[in-house]
């Protein structure tokens, strides 16, 4: 892996860790196809999404859920 590739992967992983759609979106292809399996009734961010904008909407509920879980476990 080149230094540039490694830096890009690390930046992507850091963006994912924030669960901030604005930080994640630049790493997604415009025609991304995303599938996150799980019970949609319980986890509304599960399911299939197509396109950068649709996939970016996944991260807002995931970010909220993560904050809620952090508050419970703290």
Image (cartoon, grey):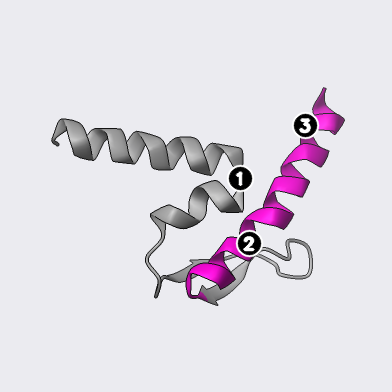
Q: In which quarter of the image is the N terminus?
A: top left
The residue lying furthest to the right in this view is 72
43 to the left or right of 13: right
Residue 66 on the magenta span:
yes
Q: Earlier in the sequence, mark 3 or mark 2?
A: 2
Q: Which of marks 1 and 3 is nearer the N terminus?
A: 1
Callout 1: few (<14), some (14-19), or many (20+) C-alpha neighbours within 10 Å?
many
Relative height, residue 40 to residue 66 (above, below): below
Secondary structure under the numbered disc 3 in the rendered image: helix
The answer to whether the residue labelled 1 contacts the one labelled 3, judged by CB atoms less than 8 Å apart, is no
Mark 1 lies on residue: 19
The residue lying furthest to the left in this view is 2
Callout 2: few (<14), some (14-19), or many (20+) C-alpha neighbours within 10 Å?
many
Is 41 in front, or is 51? 51
Q: Which residue is drawn at 67% across and 63% down?
A: 45
- CA–CA distance in space, label 2 to label 1: 9 Å
Mark 2 lies on residue: 58
Q: Which residue is drawn at 36% across and 34% down?
A: 10
Residue 59 on the magenta span:
yes
Residue 70: image tag: 3
Relative height, residue 61 to residue 52 (above, below): above
- CA–CA distance in space, label 3 to label 2: 19 Å
45 to the left or right of 27: right
């Amino acid at each position: 892996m080149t230094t540039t590739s490694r830096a890009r992967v690390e930046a992507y992983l850091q963006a994912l860790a924030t669960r901030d759609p604005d930080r994640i979106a630049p790493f997604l292809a415009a025609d991304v196809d995303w599938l996150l399996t799980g019970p949609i009734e319980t986890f509304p961010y599960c399911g299939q999404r197509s396109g950068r904008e649709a996939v970016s909407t996944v991260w807002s509920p995931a970010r909220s859920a993560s904050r809620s879980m952090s508050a419970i476990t703290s």
